[in-house]
Image (cartoon, rainbow, N blue to C red):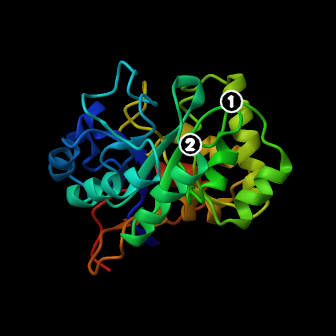
Amino acid sequence: MRYPAFCDHHVHLGLVDVAGLADSGVGRVVDLGWSDAVVALAQAAPVPAAYAGRFVSAPGGYPSASRWAPPRCTSEVAEPRDAADAVAHQVALGASVVKVTLNRDAGPVPDVPTLRAVVDAALEADLPVVAHAEGPGMVELALAGRVGALAHTPWTHRLDGEVLEEAVEAGQAWVSTLDIHGYGTPTPDQDRAVDNLARFHAAGGRVLYGTDLGNGPLPAALNPRELALLAAAGLDDDALLAALADPWPFVALPGAATTEVPDGPEPLLERLASAHVGGEGE
């Protein structure tokens, strides 16, 4: 059967060999944060690449102090009136999504009015907003700011049921990124992430397949460990395929590539391992 080209909804093209994405089983990627150089990286990728451009952060906020972060990778918003210029920069880059960073342990974070101003400016430009929400209170901040997606399944602590329900009712989407918490070895962070995602999915939450490619030893291909962890979180075959083929944040294009999943008696995860990109246009 054919599906829309499978998408890794969280990659960092500046940290991977983009040529390795050819014939990888991944037919689209979403770069969730880099410098302005992401435009050239996306153009060099062998598969369609959407991107967020710079991280939108509070002054001195994450990831400005991170060793892996490239120079001039943040657009700082100190107050609501700064939001329009930050979003306008992303629009000028050709961004398909705006990413905000909410990690109080790694630096300042925007207050609710400033975060809402960023979201409002992005929505006015027809761009969705995704947040890196790390640590206690950060998912709640994203919800208060009306952020539509999380770049990672929350992993630092077990979320309260009321927060999960609010996220589902708000229509928030979560990118999985479960394998980065162990790379094949179970860890407490991974266990918490799988538990949070399982409860979010069971409540009707929208799940997107994503790996955070470039963050540690991850394959530049469909990641069987990520898929197995999604299954462990309760996603059945239909839900797995939906998470892989979800168009966020791409706009549907005529003649878009498809992914073919072979029919057969083997379990879906085995058949996905042999899926390929570059199918005929729809």
Q: Which residue is mark 2?
A: 152
Which sits in the foreground, 67 or 144? Answer: 144
Which sits in the foreground, 123 or 273? Answer: 123
- Point out which mark residue 214 bears: none
Q: Residue furthest top?
A: 67
Where is residue 88, by image quadrant? bottom left
Rendered location of residue 214, percent (x, y): 37, 32
* Residue at 85%, 50% in the rendered image: 161
Label 2 crowd (10 A; few <14 / some 14-19 / many >=20): many
Label 1 crowd (10 A; few <14 / some 14-19 / many >=20): some
- Point out which mark residue 156 bears: 1
Where is residue 133, by image quadrant? top right
Res. 233 in view: no
Task: Point out the image quarter for the C terminus.
Answer: bottom left
**Circles 1 and 2: CB distance less than 8 Å?**
no
* Residue at 27%, 28% in the rendered image: 70
Amino acid at pointer 1: Thr
Res. 3 in view: yes
Using residue 21 as the reference point, say whether residue 178 is left or right of it.
Answer: right
Amino acid at pointer 2: His
* Residue at 69%, 37% in the rendered image: 193
Rendered location of residue 219, percent (x, y): 40, 34
| Disc 1, SS | loop
| Disc 2, SS | loop
* Residue at 14%, 46% in the rendered image: 40
